[in-house]
Image: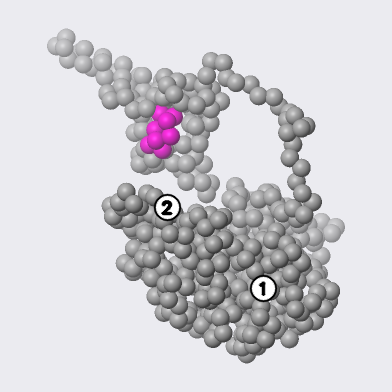
Amino acid sequence: MLGAYAILISKWKNELGRLILLVQHQWLGIDKTSKMPLNRQIYEQIQQAIENGTLRRGDSVPASRLLAERLQVSRTVVLGAYEQLQAEGYLEMRKGAGTFIADNAAGGQDNPLELDDELDAEMVVNVPDFLSFVRSPMSGLVDVADTAACDFRHGVPAWDAFPMDRWQKSLLKACRRATPDTLTYGPAEGLMSLREEIARLVRSTRSIPAVPEQIVITSGATQALDILARLCLRTGEQVLVEDPTHPVLREIFSFSGGRVIPVPVDEQGLCTNRIEESIARHNGSPDKTKLLYITPSHQFPMGVTMSLHRRIELLNWARNTGAVIIEDDYDSEYRYVGKKVSALAGLDSSGKVVYVGSFSKILFPSLRIGYAILPPALIEPFLAVKWITDRMSPTLEQEALADFIQSGQYAKHVHQMGKLYAGRRSCLVACLVEEFGDRVRYFGDEAGLHLLIELDSPADENSIAEKSLQYGAKVYPASDYYSSFRPDKPTFLLGYANLSELQIKQGIKQFARAERDCRPGC
């Protein structure tokens, strides 16, 4: 009898200890409306508590089951955070005792090192004047995450619908196949297995008769563009870009010393008949034009598709001038109206087009795998610059991606996402019409993952965006995408792929409310 009571008292003490531990960690919480994964929220809060001394070496943390119950999340969420903290040396698991702050964890020291708040003036680096055009990632034009409840950020796929379980299988398969040689430096051009899959992919979906030897794997499309700028431009030489286009793109070419000349875009794409006029207007010289950047399948940001006769005119222009065309096949995978148009590179018979592709907007941005399909004359020079600046792209991820494509999971994912995005795109169009009526014009609804919209409103574009953010919806003014002129009406770029239909409806209501409140006299 006494033994039974002893066991009962022991269990009660253990339970009381767990409850006290939970109370001590009431500061630890989660925000289920945030786009940050739940396990990441838990991870960051515990990490910060260790770094600032709230938690010290030897302190215990709640059992994963109890913390999961208090936060009302799956236990695997808490375990994921704990395992990451353990892997990074912040936590240690003691069998039969629990989970504790590791003895060698950073932070939590008795006498933490204090640093001077101000930098020595001699330590400040002077940035050269020619770099003054480079934008900070905080400028709002660079794709960084935001905490707004409804973020209409463009170029972001539906993270919540990504088949993580199938991707994990491909990663595990790549790890099982790995040998000691896998851990050394790989080929600068990328793994042959992935290049073969990409060659098959572009032949079947983009009508490009590429062979693996023409394909170089890059760290996203951005690196491919940077290498081409370094390779083809000398200071003062010209690169033609669409107007409008992404400001960061202009910076990539300017960074290499190029003179960026905008060429207008209309409903048929880049105006090929205005190339010479644009060069002359900006005091350029036709013989100094070395590059032309274009998004013919789904122009960014207007979303129009370049007509066939203009594609032929552009190829003839490149053949006559010797300039290289960079075809960025932006958002070409998703088309909701009409048939897909073949890539410009598929029409090129003179080796003037470099085709640039990426998996960031199809799978997930942090994958950072892109590629360039190069004419024979550019392969070796391109590889030389790639090797000098980056050496190689990660091989395990390449192996996993090759398996993901070869197994049919990639094609299946694109098909499923096409149906999902079509529904979200229709929802966005309907909500815009419902809230703004005939005061809204939208472009690019036939394909892609965003709309460009123009409002017939006297309100200021930036004021609308600021007020909308206060109401919980982040929208993106688009005037900075234009070079030769600025739209005379409020213009916005609205991404919709990573938003549920409920979020889209709520976000557009908040956006419309902001526009009303920003009208003069309101």
Taking the spot 75% from the left edge, 78% from the top edge, the residue there is 287
**Badge 2 amino acid:** Tyr
Where disc 2 sits, the SS reads loop
Span of residues in magenta? 82-91
Asked whether the viewer can see residue 3, the reply is yes
Position in image of residue 26 (x %, y %): 48, 27
**Badge 1 amino acid:** Leu
Asked whether the viewer can see residue 68, the reply is no
Q: Foreground: 421 or 114?
A: 114
Task: Let me know if residue 332 is in the magenta part.
Answer: no
Taking the spot 37% from the left edge, 59% from the top edge, the residue there is 399
Mark 2 or mark 1, which is nearer to you?
2
* Residue 307 relative to residue 263: left or right: left
2 or 1: tag closer to the N-terminus: 2
**Quarter that holds the N terminus:** top left
Way the structure is coloured? one colour
Taking the spot 44% from the left edge, 72% from the top edge, the residue there is 213
Residue 171 higher or lower than 13, as above or below: below
Q: Which mark is residue 330?
A: none
Prevailing SS of the magenta stretch: helix
Residue 163, by quadrant, is: bottom left
Task: Let me know if residue 88 is in the magenta part.
Answer: yes
Position in image of residue 82 (x %, y %): 39, 35
Residue 230, by quadrant, is: bottom right
Disc 2: which residue: 185
* Residue 520 relative to residue 516: left or right: right
Disc 1: which residue: 291
